[in-house]
Image: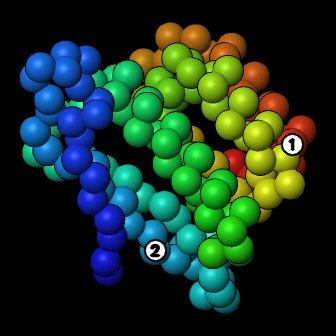
Amino acid sequence: MTGVRWSAATLSRDWSKPLEGSICAVMWPTLTPARRERWFDELYVWTEGFQASTMQRARIQLAALHKALMLLEREQVKKVGVTLSFGTVERCLDLVTDTFDAHRLTKHRLCVLLRGSLERIRSPYRVRSFIDWLRTQEIPIG
C-alpha cells in the first residue's frame, strides 16, 4: 500500500530546532464483517522518527480530519473514516466542530473512530458532549 510522507519540521515549537522525522498517511478499505463489502476508506496517520507531543498529535489529527473532508468534497472517496483521540477532543473541541461545520454538505459521509484510555480522560463531559453532537449531526462514530 502506498502512502504519503511530510516533513515534521512544521510541528516544531522552536523554529531554530526543527523536528527530525515525518508524518505519514495511508488509506485502506475497511470492510463490513458479514458481507465483506466496503464500509469506508480509513485515513490512517502516524509519525516516524520522532515521538509527537500531545498537542502535536492533536494538530496532526486535525489536519487529517480536514484532509478527509476535502477528499469527500472532491469526490475522491465515497465514505472516509478518521481517528480522533480523546485528548484531541478534550483540547481542541471547538476546532474539531468548526472543521465539521465548514464541511456541512459532506460531513455525513465521514466516520469518526474515537480512541484512547477511559481512565486517562480529563474532561469526560467534553468527550460525551462531542459524541452526542456527532450523533445529532448523523455522523457515524465508533
- Rendered image: mark on residue 17: none
The residue positioned farthest toward the front in the image shown: 16
Element under disc 1: loop
From the viewer's perspective, is residue 125 above or below residue 133? above
Q: Is residue 116 visible?
A: no
Determine the image quadrant of residue 38: bottom right
Element under disc 2: strand
Q: Is residue 15 left or right of residue 140?
A: left
Residue contact between numbered discs 1 and 2, judged by CB atoms under 8 Å: no
> Which amino acid lies under the numbered mark 1 shown in the image of this protein?
Gln
Determine the image quadrant of residue 53: top left
From the viewer's perspective, is residue 92 above or below residue 19? above
Badge 1: few (under 14), some or many (20 or more) residues near its Cα, within 10 Å?
A: some
**Separation of disc 1 and disc 2 at Cα?**
25 Å
The residue singled out by tag 2 in the image is 28
- Spot occupied by residue 75 in the image (x, y as percentages of width and height): 70, 73
Badge 2: few (under 14), some or many (20 or more) residues near its Cα, within 10 Å?
A: some
From the viewer's perspective, is residue 133 above or below residue 30? above
- Rendered image: mark on residue 137: 1
At x 25%, y 18%, the residue is 13
> Which amino acid lies under the numbered mark 2 shown in the image of this protein?
Trp
